[in-house]
Image (cartoon, grey):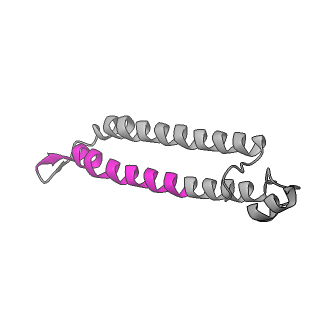
């Protein structure tokens, strides 16, 4: 991508909106797993290796979900950033229509 070239404001707004949705969705899922699983697992009154089963669900199952949240978020952001780059590369350059003079020495020669 060329420096200084950005996509249109519509593309920028769509990018921010999608990013915000992923962040909010990830946080809601994280909170649901953190508090919901711990609350629901209290009803599992089974001992597993001397510990309540709810402990194992909270300690192991929640970590698996957290890793899944991170993997999904990273994949979604990579795709979103690739779309951003494609939009930026297809955007018109601020230098479109400007013709090059040549080397600086040629410009000086023309002035003299």
Q: Magenta part of the protein: which range? A: 50-75
Left or right of 49, for residue 76:
right
Left or right of 45, for residue 90:
right
Is 40 in the magenta? no
**Residue 40: x %, y % from top left:** 35, 38
| Residue placed furthest toward the left | 50
| Residue placed furthest toward the right | 97
Q: Nearer the viewer, residue 97 or 7?
A: 97
Q: Nearer the viewer, residue 101 or 34?
A: 101
- Name which quarter of the figure residue 34 lies in: top left
Does the magenta stretch mainly form a helix, a strand or a loop?
A: helix
| Residue at the spot 62% in from the left edge and 53% down from the top edge | 80
- Name which quarter of the figure residue 37 lies in: top left
The N terminus: image quadrant: bottom right
Q: Is residue 103 above or below residue 73?
A: below
| Residue at the spot 64% in from the left edge and 40% down from the top edge | 16
Left or right of 64, for residue 92:
right
The C terminus: image quadrant: bottom right
**Residue 48: x %, y % from top left:** 17, 52
| Residue at the spot 74% in from the left edge and 48% down from the top edge | 7
**Residue 86: x %, y % from top left:** 71, 59
Q: Nearer the viewer, residue 30 or 45?
A: 30
Left or right of 33, for residue 44:
left
Is 72 in the magenta? yes
Q: Is residue 17 above or below residue 59?
A: above
- Number of marks present in the image shown: 0
| Residue at the spot 69% in from the left edge and 49% down from the top edge | 4
């Amino acid at each position: 991508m060329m420096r200084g070239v950005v996509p249109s404001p519509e593309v920028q707004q769509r990018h921010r909106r999608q990013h915000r949705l992923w962040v909010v969705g990830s946080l809601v899922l994280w909170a649901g797993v953190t508090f919901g699983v711990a609350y629901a697992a209290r009803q599992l009154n089974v001992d597993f290796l001397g510990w309540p089963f709810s402990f194992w669900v909270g300690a192991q199952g929640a970590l698996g979900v957290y890793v899944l949240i991170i993997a999904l978020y990273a994949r979604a952001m990579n795709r979103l950033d690739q779309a951003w780059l494609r939009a930026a590369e297809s955007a018109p350059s601020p230098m479109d229509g400007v013709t090059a003079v040549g080397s600086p020495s040629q410009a000086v020669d023309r002035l003299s």
